[in-house]
Amino acid sequence: MGITRRAEIGWDGDLMAGSGVIRYVSSGSISRLPVTWASRTEAHDGRTSPEELIAAAHASCYAMAFSAQLARNGTPGEHLEVSAVVTFGKTDAGWKIVSSDLTVVGTVPNIDETKFVELATAAKDGCPVSQALKGNVELSVVATLRP
């Protein structure tokens, strides 16, 4: 059996005027995160959204996958800066997560830019969060090797 993680939220009211609070995650590392429909579709005003949480999950998963790719290549990275931008937009089919765009800037000795970009792309395809999103969400990565 696999490892499980848990999150709990309470929600009050309808979609447009209602609000919720993510009150528990199994690690205990975050709690009491407010969330509303407006924080998804307008200014966040200090509240989170499912898309922001997916962006955090995608960026952290990708950083792990890319660091593993670099190590397998015999060129372990010294430092990676990863960001994920998740876009939530209205389509003909309604609201949906449209894309997750990864950006990575890395300090990696003994690797050329071509190999760095090749491994960055492979990590995007191999990251478990990317695999969960693949086919439903447009995925991209822009990789830059820091001299």
Image (cartoon, grey):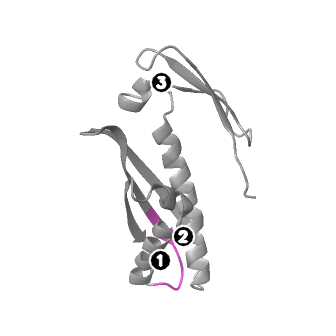
Query: Relative to 64, is 60 above or below?
Result: above
Residue at image location 41% in from the left, 76% down from the top: 117
Nearer to us of marks 3 and 2 is 3
Label 2: element kind: helix
Instruction: List the residue tagged with mark 1.
Output: 119
Residue at image location 54% in from the left, 81% down from the top: 109
Label 3: element kind: loop
Q: Amino acid at mark 1?
A: Leu
Q: Which residues are magenta?
A: 104-111
Query: Is 139 on the left or on the right of 22, as rendered?
Result: left
Marks 3 & 1, CB-CB < 8 Å contact? no
- Placement of the C terminus among the 4 image quadrants: bottom left
Query: Is 16 on the left or on the right of 123, as rendered?
Result: left
Inter-mark Cα distance, 3 to 1: 38 Å
Which label sits on residue 66?
2
Inter-mark Cα distance, 2 to 1: 7 Å
Marks 2 & 1, CB-CB < 8 Å contact? yes
State which tag comes first along the sequence, 3 or 2: 3
Residue at image location 56% in from the left, 84% down from the top: 73
